[in-house]
Every structure is written in C-alpha cells, then in structure tokens.
Image: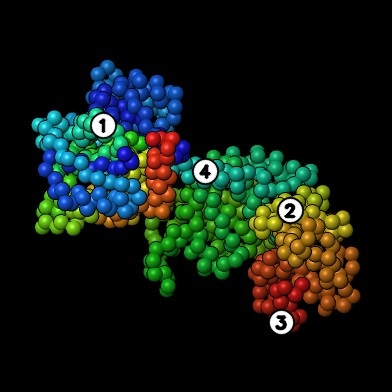
Amino acid sequence: MAKCVVICPIGSVDHGMLERIARHIEMRCSVMCKVSPRMDRPEYAYDERRCQFNSTTILKHLIRCCPDEALGFMGVTCEDLFVPILKYVFGLAEMEGRCSVISMHRLRPEFYDRPPDQPLLEERVKKTALHELGHCLGLTHCKNRRCVMYSSVRIEDTDMKHADFCPTCSQLFTWRIDTCLSPRRL
Amino acid sequence: MSKMPRILVVDDERPMRESLNDWLKEDGYRVGLASSGQEAVDMARKDPWEVILLDLKMPGMDGLKTLKKLKEVRPDAEVLMMTAYATVETAVQAMKEGAFDYLVKPFDPDEVEVQIKKILAHKELVLENILLRRKLEETYQFDEIIGRSNAMQEVFALISRVAPTDSTVLITGESGTGKELIARAIHGNSKRCFMPFIAVSCGALPDSLLESELFGYEKGAFTGAEHTKKGRFEMAHKGTLFLDEIGDVSLKTQVNLLRVLQQKEVQRLGSEKVMEVDVRIIAATNRDLAKAIEEKRFREDLYYRLNVIHIGVPPLRERKDDIPLLTDAFIRKYCLEMNREEARVGASAMKQLMAYDWPGNVRELENIVERALVIGRSKEISADDLPFSRKGGGPETFPKSLKRMEKVHIERILEAAGWNISQAARDLDIDRQTLYNKLEKYEIRRGDS
C-alpha cells in the first residue's frame, strides 16, 4: 500500500469536514490522505485539576497506534489540549516523527464569543493540520507571518497566515516528503 | 540552524522539561534539559547557553541558589525563572540575583515566546553595543594618525603621557595637520573615553551664535529662541570639549569662556540657573597666539588657562619622510571606499609629492590622492594624475605673472581645504567675500584646477 497521511478523528468530530481537510492536504502536499475510523474520547489523557486533556499523553497513544503505511498520523479532537508547561496548545507534533494531534476547541469562533462560522473553522483546522504535518517533516517555525509554519500562539496568528507554505518552507516540505517517499525509506 | 540560540531548561518535573523541549524545538531552538540545579551548573560549565529557563522550586539546590551559581559560571546567560507559586518577594529576590524575568507556570504560549524574543533582542543589543564600543576604541587609536618621523613620534609620546590626565591641552599647527585627530586620540585614550567627545569649530560661527552653541539657551532668551537648547559644554559633561580654531574667538566670548573654565560652571543664555560641568578642554589653533596676545586680540589669562600642555603638530613639509606612508594609507582607504584594486604610486609621481611644499598639509595630500584615484583609473598613480603637473606649474615651477600666481595659489589652497570656502578664506587670511570676489575675477570653479 502506498504511503499516505492518515487523519484520525478522536471522539466526536464532523467526518465531512475531515474529508475536506484531507483533500486540502492532498492538493497542497501532493500526497495521498485518508480519514480513518474514529478513536474513543481520550479519557486516559484527562487532567481533572486543569479540566483539559494532556496532548503529550494523547500523542504517545497515537505513536503506539500509528499504522505502518502512514507517512503521517494526525489525531483531530474537539477537546481542549494542554502541555504541562503551557496553558493550552492548538496542536502538538512529534518533531521529525509521524504523529500529531490537533484540537478544534480553541479554533471554534464560539470559544471567543463569536457566532458559529463553519468556513472559518475549517480554514483554521486546515492551517493547523498543515502546520503540524510540517513539524512531523522536521520543519520549524517560520518568520514569515503569512506562512502556515508561522508560530500560532494566539488565534489571531492562525487567522493572519495562509493555509499554505511560503516558498522556502514549501521547498523544504517537498524535499522532506520526497525523501520520505523514496524507495530507500520504504 | 546551527546559529539558532541555545536554551537550557532546568526543571525537576519531567513532563515540564519535555513539554518545554517540544515547544522550543518547534521554534528551531537548540534545547538542553537538566533535572536539577547541579546538573544545570555542570551543563553551563560545559557549554554556553543564551537563555536558561530555571524552575524556582526544586529539591536539593533550589532555583535561587542555582541562579547564583549559574551567574558565576555564565554571567552572560539570561535566566528566566519559572514557578507555579508566584510571590512578589521571590520574584524581586530572583531579579536582584540577576534573573531577567519571571514566568508563572503554566505559561500562556505567547508569554514565553515574547519573553524569549525579548531576551534575544536584548542580547543582540548588548552585543551590538560591545561591537560599537570596540569600533569606537579603534577609531580613537593612534592608528588614525600616521607618522614614522621623529617629529610625529614625539607627538605620539606626548599624547600617551597627556591622555590619562585631566589637563587642558592646546594643540597648535597649520591647517590640515590633523589637530582634531590628535584631540580625539587624547580623548579616546583617557578615562573619559566612553563619555562624549564634542567638537566645536569656533571660527566657523559668528560671535552670538558661538555663545549660544557653547552655553545653550532658554526658550525666549532672544528672538528666535523657540525652544530650550543644551550648550556644547553641557553635552560634553564628563567627556571632552574640543574647541577648534580658538584663535578666532572674539574677545567678548573669550571672557565668557574664561569664566566657565575657571568656575567649571555654565549658565544657559536667558537662564538664572548655574550648572556645574565636568569637562576636559582641548583647544586648537593654526594662529600664532603669542602674536595675537601682543596685538591684544587674544587674552593672556585665557591663553595660560588653555596652554597647560602644549602639543605642536609639525607641518607636512617638516616631516616629508612620512609622505610615502601617508600616501599608501590614503590609497588603501580610498581604494576600499571606491571598491577598486589597490593602486601604487609611480616613481615620478612620488618624486613630485616629495618635492611639493604642502601648504595644506596632510589634508591636501589626502585630497590629492583621492582626486588622483578618481581621475586615473590605472593601477599606478602617475605624475599626470597629480594636479600640480596638469597645471603646468608644480612645486618647482612658478608662474611669472603675479595675477597668475595668485590664481594658482588660491586654487591650491581651495584644493587643500577640500573646497571649504570658510577654511580656504581663513588659510588665505582674507574674508569669505574677498575670496568669492577673487573666484569670480579669476573664474575659478570647482573642477577647473
């Protein structure tokens, strides 16, 4: 089976939206992308004190479950994620690895007391997904505010950037993808 | 990537260390992890770290003790303290011990990013400052003053002896001999070297303007004083004030200058307030001050106040041995500026340079070298590239007609002064208007000579 990026819903996530995200990844990254069956809500990662889910714990779980043929394995959840040192994260990736997890919790306009806006949410998820995929392929944060690899520490940063790589990151990304897809690595 | 800053994370809790590690690596930083204060100190001894994120509460050596040790080992590393229990007291104490700032766990993602960027920007500024200071120190070295001749060696020895003292210095010498360079070298090698060096060209300003420049003025002190202005004495506080062309200062201003020098106090025009100033004075002139005193154009008491230490700069014609060295230095300087291959001086050109009398001294030589490099594009400066040969005159031959001689002389002085009309007028000992009249009469224009 050809190597592809696998998107895995964790808990209840809109399947139609994930399919559209998968098509976007295919178009932007020139790799196959599919949506896998969903995983259960990650109760194992719930932190009662913080009332949030520990993204590091989820990531470790994803690493254990990662399919062999996956070039990238990306969990998508509606839960609010954190890492122990930070109050929240939009996503977390295994740097130069295969797994990542993204949270839609703080990508929803409702979180910021705005009315629901499906296209805006999808655009934000696309950007976060591409960003974490970039990390999996070893890309670090970019200084270009419009590049999808620009560090998003606030939702405004996510909205400011495009759902695509800047020319430099794009070249790096393509080179890494090619390396990963080359027969030597298979 | 190899230029990315190095960040050391010190925390006894593994999840904290690991999550910071992941977060910082996404930004491309090179990250080191230490689980205790002692491990952090050992790691700091081994490698340089730009930023250290240090947990305050740790078993064994706590954050504050670790901070102290880290500052001993790596004083240039900036430390950001982290704690889950923020109290003003501990924050203040950590800052007193040299921490850059303080973060409360868990952080806002933008908070940690902003803090790290702030530290790195601060470190960049510090580095820039060090480099600038170093550059400034180089500028103040004697290297700027070139000379192997005995006469110049005596000047260098005098600068070395005088610089560390606070004594007032009077530098005399013809125009273009490099009096300001000597003043800068004295300042640069003195304990005041990191404080301002303020130069005032006293001869270039009319009397009233010179006083307001030197002493400053309050808003409304005179018509046109729309805002308060600091004087040069105030600006030079703790540093050096270089009074160039002191021989051209009017008697009235001399009285005011003398008062400031005696009392070490200055009063802005239109102000009642007297300000103390700590300024080292270096004065310079191309005039014969002894003669000016005889002619009652210069106050004797001011002369003695200024002439505590006297440095006489020899004219270039009295240190012709230095001409090849100076010429080479100017060639290097201008070839670098013009981004061209270094040129040499041909034998006949050097002969002419050595034979010339150099009324405009080193400044004239510098102008002539620059001009020769602009005119002649070959690797060798030939006699044809020098202005004296093109005029058909030169050091050895003089025009017979007095009018022609005057024209040639004015042209030479203008060249030597770099076409600074005021300077040339002073060198010729005529006023600017007379010089303008002569330029018109002889149809002298820049680029003609």
Residue B107 position, x and y percent, is 22, 38
Q: Amino acid at mark 2?
A: Glu
B330 horizontally vs B405: left or right:
left
Q: Amino acid at mark 1?
A: Ile
Q: How is the image coloured?
A: rainbow
- The disc at residue B440 is 3
Q: Are marks 4 and 3 on the same chain?
A: yes
Of labels 4 and 3, earlier in sequence is 4
Of labels 2 and 4, earlier in sequence is 4
Q: Secondary structure at mark 4?
A: helix
- Marks 2 and 4, how far apart in space? 28 Å
Seen from the viewer's position, the closer of residues B15 and B309 is B15
Determine the residue positioned at 41% across, 25% down: B44
Q: Which residue position holds label 1? A: A63
Q: Which residue position holds label 2? A: B342
Q: Amino acid at mark 3?
A: Glu
- Marks 1 and 2, how far apart in space? 64 Å
Looking at the image, residue A84 lies above or below residue B339: above
Tag nearer the camera, 4 or 3? 4
Q: Is residue B68 visible?
A: no
Judging from the image, mark 4 belongs to the subunit labelled: B
